[in-house]
Structure formats: structure tokens, C-alpha cells
Amino acid sequence: MTPDQRTLAIRIALTVTVLEFFGPVLRDYHPSHAFNPDWVGHARVHLVWLLGFMGLSGIANVYLIWFRRPFELRNLWLSAGWQCCNLGGFWIAYLLEGHYGGAITVPGIHTHIFGIDENVFAFSVLSCVMLAAFALLVSVAKRETVDVL
């Protein structure tokens, strides 16, 4: 695989993983979350704030991946790091849900895929795609370092 092909593969992988920003925006601006009358109004403000941040972060990441000029590999590193913060935030929330009284699955709203909550399944897939993107980024970065020397 040529460096250009690797870079294209990284861009495609990061485009897949950038969906992690838009899924919650589409899914949680909904009666089960943002419009849930059982939630304290201030909690709903924080949710909509988070969803706004996530949506704008997704747009910024698409810009870094495909539109920022001149193109530099560090744009992809920045996008990958930013996306890992979002992925990491999900995994922290999931791992600590018992500590703060959270619930990853809302019965009647979330489904299961292969017996796994849809969120855990989706973020597991996205995390694997991100690992592949990082591996490709490292291989391209090593190649550029060798080419410069």
C-alpha cells in the first residue's frame, strides 16, 4: 500500500469514527433525553450543551479530515486525538455507571446487537476502527520520517 493509499484509508477510517459525534445528537435530542420531563431542567441544559459541542466537534473533524488546506498529516493526528477523547468519555461513563447511578440501556429505547447493548456494540466497533486508523497513522508517520532522513 502506497503512502497515498494509507492516507486515504486513514481519512476513510476517521470519517467512519467521526460518526460517534453525530449519533448522540440524532438519538438524544428526543423525548427520552432532552425532552424528558422527568429530568431536572438543568440536566437537560447540560445535555443539549453536550450535544451542541458534539455536533460542532463532528463538523470540525470532517473539516480537518477532508477540507483543511494545505493538507498535513498532523490534521489527521489532531482529528484522531480529538475523537479518542470522545470515545474515552463514553468508556469512562460506561465503566463508572454503577458509581453514579447511570444506566447504559434504557428499556424500550435501546436495543441489543448480538446480546450487547447497541451503544457498547457501536462504540466497540468505532474503537476498533480507531485503533486501525492509529496503526495506519503510525505507519505513514514512520515512512515520512524515513523519507526525510
Image (cartoon, rainbow, N blue to C red):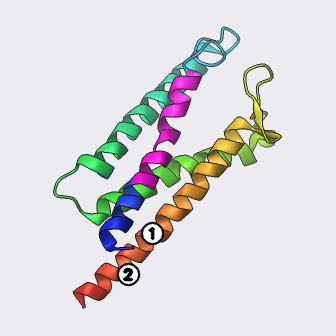
Q: Give the residue drawn at x 41%, y 52%.
A: 12
Q: Which mark is residue 60?
A: none
The answer to which of 87 and 131 lies nearer the viewer is 131
**Circle 2: element type:** helix
- Residue 94 at x, y percent in the picture: 71, 44
Q: Residues within 10 Å of mark 2 (few under 14, many from 20)?
A: few
User: Would residue 142 appear left or right of 103 to someone viewing this image?
Assistant: left
- Residue 49 at x, y percent in the picture: 47, 27
> Who comes first in sequence, dot 1 or dot 2?
1
- Please state which amino acid type lies under the numbered disc 1: Leu
Q: Give the residue drawn at x 36%, y 45%.
A: 61
The residue furthest front is 1
Per the model, the C-alpha gap separating discs 1 and 2 is 10 Å
Q: Does residue 111 appear anywhere in the picture? A: yes
- Please state which amino acid type lies under the numbered disc 2: Lys
**Circle 1: element type:** helix
Residue 9 part of the magenta-drawn span: no
For the N terminus, give its image quadrant.
bottom left
Region of the chain picked out in magenta, as a range = 12-28
**Residue occupied by mark 1:** 136
The answer to which of 41 and 23 lies nearer the viewer is 23
Q: Main secondary structure of the magenta part?
A: helix
Q: Residues within 10 Å of mark 1 (few under 14, many from 20)?
A: some
**Residue occupied by mark 2:** 142
User: Would residue 18 appear left or right of 74 to someone viewing this image?
Assistant: right
- Are dots 1 and 2 in contact, CB under 8 Å? no
